[in-house]
Amino acid sequence: MTVWWILDIVLLVVVVPVVIYLLNGVLTEARGIVPSVRRIGAAAAAGSADLDAVPLLLTTQDQVIRTIETAANYGGSLDVILDDASEE
Amino acid sequence: MPAPGVVLILTVVAIVLVLVFFLVSTIVALRQITKGLDEAIASVVEIIEKTAPVEEVVGTINQYLDAGVDLLEGLLVKKAGMRDAVGLVDGIYPGAAAAGFRNFPESTEITAPRISEVYTKGTLTLARLGREAPIAAASPIGGAVLRNVTGGSLAARSLYPEVRQTRPERLQRSPVIGTDSPVQYEPSDSPGVRRRLPGGTAVLDDPAPATPPPANAPDAQNDPEGEPGADTRPV
């Protein structure tokens, strides 16, 4: 009978607080992750929205190509018009 | 049932209830995490899809820009010479001479002439475009100046036919024309060429401003440039 009482006391004094402490820690950490995950989702959505202008890079590419081609034509003309620098 | 057994059972039931409460709460929190991660992953997938062609496009842009840099650097060094090219770039972008040209590693060893401290960018451009500019007399590019610096405005006449060069400095005023004009001009034989002008010399004759022209000679001071009968012989 005494053993049973000792077992009951150990269960109430040691096991139950430990179980409650551990489970409370897990729940607290799990709840702490939720806001972080929501912020990550919002940031990813905002980043995705910022990339909507990426197709404009194709326009930039075309403009760069045309600019360089114009510069090349102009440079070719200058190469013909101007004398080369004299050797020092 | 003995009392310790009842206490034990009540304790176990209490522990189970606590476990249920905390575990259910944890499950709810984990489900919220899963939902948030799903949304984040969806956005990340969008980012990946949107940025997929960026590398190719940016690579193409860089390729063309590299070609442009090669072209401009090569042209500048070829036309201005390495020393002046470094000086020009350093004049426009102070401190750029230290970096030198990308395709000319030896350009970093050149002491850039302080061109921009003496001349403006526009003057430098004229000086590099050709030796016609008066400033080219002081240009470090070398070579004889093609233009007469002291009489630069008259030197351009050498580009025109002889009549243009030797015409008098002061021409007569433009004649008054019309039926009521004080001087009536004879009609020309051919378009643009008059038989004579009152008090003038022949149009096609060489000008002789020192001596009075004959009465029947056309006026040499009449500018025939651009007319069909004008002297277009080269200089």
Image (cartoon, helix red, strand yellow):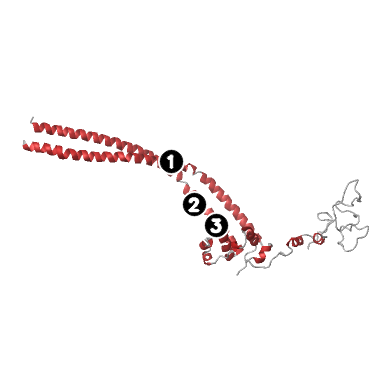
Q: Residues within 10 Å of mark 2 (few under 14, many from 20)?
A: few
| Chain letter of disc 3 in the image | B
Image marks 3 and 1: residues in contact by CB distance under 8 Å: no
Q: Secondary structure at mark 3?
A: helix
Is label 3 or label 1 in front? 1
Judged from this view, the residue extending furthest toward the front is: B117
Identity of the residue drawn at 18% across and 35% down: B15
Residue type highlighted by circle 3? Val
Q: Residues within 10 Å of mark 3 (few under 14, many from 20)?
A: some
In which quadrant will I find the N terminus of chain B? top left
Question: Is label 3 or label 2 in front?
Answer: 3
Q: Which mark is nearer the camera, 1 or 2?
A: 1
- Residue at x-position 22% and y-position 40%: A21
Q: Is residue B163 left or right of residue B142?
A: right
Query: Residue B184, how many percent across, how many down?
Result: 92, 50
The residue under label 2 is B59
Query: Residue tagged by mark 1?
Result: A46
**Is circle 3 on the same chain as circle 2?**
yes
Residue B91 vertical position relative to residue A22 in the rendered view, above or below:
below
- The disc at residue B69 is 3
Q: Position of residue B204 (x, y in %)?
A: 86, 59
Residue B37 seen: no
Q: Mark 1 to mark 2: distance in Å?
A: 26 Å
Residue lying at the far left of the rendered structure: A1
The residue marked by circle 2 belongs to what chain? B
What residue is drawn where x is 16% and y is 34%? Answer: B12
Callout 3 and callout 1 share a chain:
no
Q: Nearer the viewer, residue A42 or A67?
A: A42
What's the residue type where badge 1 is placed? Ala
